[in-house]
Image (tube, rainbow, N blue to C red):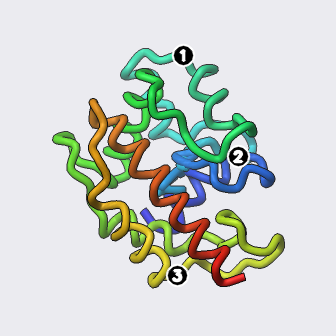
């Protein structure tokens, strides 16, 4: 869930919207990875896990893509039922969340620590990685957020929380 997750989560959004996971996912995931996300790849194509979730859940591919590429916000929508289903499926496929809704925080941390700080407000062109310290701090601070009304909404809330916290931690370093 580390590098691949964050790249999947966040590399699917435009550079100006660096936090749009994921998952946009990459996040988170692909959070990024986690960790954003989320999942669309830079070339605008879905990865196999994303396609599988869209097809299995019979979701509108364009709707999911529109959320992942929306530049008007850096966070994922918490109240979109179909996107929540998608993210739960995707996070399961990536090993970030179990079928019962519990999170695999070690996988999330492992994944997001490999993402460049620039995805979270670091200097453009600066390629240093988030690293374990920030990944652990951000994830730990989000372990006790209120759960959503569904496993998918809980995944979105967790990703948004981790993304916001990583942005704060990276900004404090600048």
User: Does the CB distance between marks 1 and 2 fall below 8 Å?
Assistant: no
- The x, y position of residue 60, in whole percent, is 54, 16
Kindly check if marks 3 and 1 are in contact, taking CB atoms under 8 A apart as contact. Answer: no
Residue toward you, 6 or 166? 166
Q: Which residue is mark 1?
A: 60
In the rendered structure, which disc, 3 or 1, sits on the residue that comes first in sequence?
Answer: 1
Asked if the residue at tag 2 contacts the one at tag 3, i.e. Cβ–Cβ closer than 8 Å, the answer is: no
Dot 2 crowding, Cα within 10 Å, few <14, some 14–19, many 20+:
many
Say whether residue 94 is left or right of residue 99: right
Residue 70: give its label. Answer: none
Q: Please give the residue where the numbered disc 3 appears in the rendered image.
A: 131
Q: Secondary structure at mark 1?
A: loop
* Image height of 5 relative to 22, above or below: below
Distance from the alpha carbon under mark 1 to that under mark 2: 18 Å
Q: Residue at x 60, y 58 (%)?
A: 7
The residue most toward the left is: 100
Q: Could you say where residue 13 lies in the image, as x and y percent from the top left?
A: 70, 46
Sequence-wise first label, 3 or 2: 2
């Amino acid at each position: 869930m580390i590098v691949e997750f964050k790249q999947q989560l966040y590399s699917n959004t435009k550079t100006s919207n660096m936090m749009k996971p994921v998952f946009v996912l990459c996040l988170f995931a692909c959070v990024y990875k986690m960790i954003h996300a989320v999942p669309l790849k830079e070339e605008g194509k879905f990865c196999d896990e994303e396609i599988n979730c869209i097809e299995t859940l019979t979701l509108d591919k364009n709707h999911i893509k529109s959320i992942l590429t929306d530049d008007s916000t850096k966070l994922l929508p918490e109240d979109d039922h179909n996107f929540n289903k998608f993210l739960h499926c995707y996070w399961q496929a990536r090993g970030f969340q179990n079928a019962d809704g519990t999170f695999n925080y070690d996988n999330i941390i492992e994944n997001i620590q490999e993402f460049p700080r620039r995805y979270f407000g670091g200097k453009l062109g600066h390629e240093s990685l988030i690293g374990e310290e920030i990944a652990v701090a951000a994830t730990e601070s989000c372990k006790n957020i209120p759960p959503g009304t569904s496993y998918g909404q809980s995944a979105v809330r967790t990703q948004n929380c981790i993304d916001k916290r990583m942005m704060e931690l990276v900004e404090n370093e600048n």
